[in-house]
Amino acid sequence: MTLTAEQGVRRGRKFDQVLDGARKVFMRDGFERASVDDIAREAGVSKATIYAYFPDKRLMFLEVARSECQRQTEAAEASIGEDVPARVALTVAAERIVGFLTSDFGQRMFRIVVGEGERFPGLGAEFHEHGPGLIHRRLVHHLGCYVATGELAIDDLDLAADQFAQLCKASIQEKLLFGLTPAVTKQDVQRSVQGTVDMFMARYGAKG
């Protein structure tokens, strides 16, 4: 097994199996009510195997969030080839972010973190670091690349990345959060993505 120093998580042959079981139980029961016994049963492994990979439940929860955000980020980056115009890359990024926000996984994770943050101080900050924070850091990197090529003109990359992510949430997140709509349609997603990219390019697109 190898030790991930940043998180104290060990990886081995049944790691993905354990993570999949943990994901299902957390999504079903939330963070507090999810038990190691239930996760072991769902994953088809022993409790000893669970503890061999994860010293505590908190790290398991954070790894579920991190792995999903990592998967989403890698999928988005893989779909963008070299020399792709900034507008095209930003459209793909917005589609992925909106897709995550409207997914069952994304909504449940958000509710778990917000709902249980009081009982578990620091959970929200750690979730952000290993989840949305990962996406933010990749956005900063790619925006910087487009600044270097002259396609974008951005002085504050960190702020611009935050603004992009927030634009993706416009007209969608609050409707889902407060139950104002039973579901988000493809038209809703397209409207949000297009509006995000148009506004971002209007502000940061390099003027000929």
Image (cartoon, helix red, strand yellow):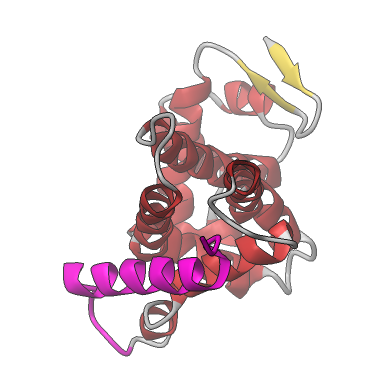
Q: Position of residue 2 (x, y in %)?
A: 70, 12
| Residue 17 appears in the picture as rendered | yes
Camera-side residue of 5 and 77: 77
Splitting the image into 4 quarters, where does residue 55 fall? top right
Query: In the picture provided, is 22 more to the left or to the right than 84?
Result: right
**Which residue is at a point 46% across and 34% down the rendered structure image?**
74
Q: Main secondary structure of the magenta part?
A: helix
| Residue 45 appears in the picture as rendered | no
**Which residue is at a point 43% across and 29% down the rendered structure image?**
82
Q: Position of residue 87 (x, y in %)?
A: 40, 54
Q: Position of residue 25 (x, y in %)?
A: 44, 48
Magenta region, residue range: 180-208
Give the position of the N terminus as an image quadrant.
top right
Is 172 placed above or below 112 here? below
Camera-side residue of 23 and 87: 87
**Which residue is at a point 49% across and 17% down the rendered structure image?**
14
Q: Position of residue 91 (x, y in %)?
A: 37, 55
Camera-side residue of 185 and 14: 185
Is 153 placed above or below 149 here? below
- In the image, is residue 188 part of the stretch drawn in magenta? yes
Camera-side residue of 207 and 22: 207
Splitting the image into 4 quarters, where does residue 5 fall? top right
Q: How many marks?
A: 0
Query: In the picture provided, is 180 more to the left or to the right than 70?
Result: left
- In the image, is residue 91 part of the stretch drawn in magenta? no
Residue sticking out furthest to the front: 208
Is 58 placed above or below 169 here? above
Splitting the image into 4 quarters, where does residue 107 fall? bottom left
